[in-house]
Image (tube, rainbow, N blue to C red):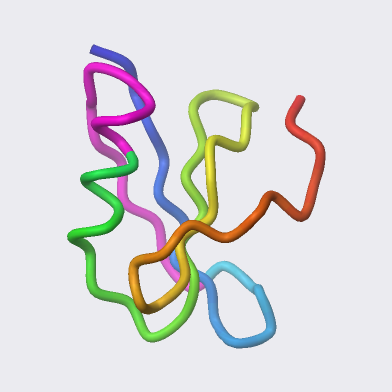
Amino acid sequence: MREYHFYFLDHQSQIQSTKIAHCADDLAALEFAQKLKAPADIEVWQSTRLVTRINAKGDNVPKERGAA
């Protein structure tokens, strides 16, 4: 299991809170993030790598930043 960080963003893309979860892989982390309820976007990170960004509707958003 890998440690993933889920960053809850506000409407200006500033981090408002964080949740940490252990998931088997990126797909499991994506499914976990889609179940979280947030008023704005959630970024999913595994270590220093941006996995994805989920909008408030639970849809993937194309990566806006290059992953490390």
Horizontal side, residue 8 vs residue 20: left or right: right
Instruction: Please give the name of the residue rendered at 69% of the width and 84% of the height, measured from the top-left corner.
Output: 12
Please tell me whether residue 2 belongs to the stretch shown in magenta: no
Q: Is residue 66 above or below residue 6?
A: above
Instruction: Please give the name of the residue rendered at 23% of the width and 17% of the height, measured from the top-left corner.
Output: 24
Horizontal side, residue 59 vs residue 49: left or right: left
Between residues 30 and 7, which one lies in front from this camera angle?
30
Horizontal side, residue 1 vs residue 19: left or right: left
Between residues 22 and 32, which one lies in front from this camera angle?
32
Between residues 12 and 16, which one lies in front from this camera angle?
12
Instruction: Please give the name of the residue rendered at 49% of the width and 27% of the height, measured from the top-left corner.
Output: 46
Quarter containing the N terminus: top left
Quarter containing the C terminus: top right
Q: Is residue 56 above or below residue 1?
A: below
Residue, far top:
1
Instruction: Please give the name of the residue rendered at 66% of the width and 74% of the height, measured from the top-left corner.
Output: 13
Q: Is residue 23 above or below residue 6?
A: above
- How far from the left and from the top, in percent, is residue 53? 53, 55
Give the magenta range. 16-29
Q: Is residue 5 above or below residue 12?
A: above
Please tell me whether residue 22 belongs to the stretch shown in magenta: yes
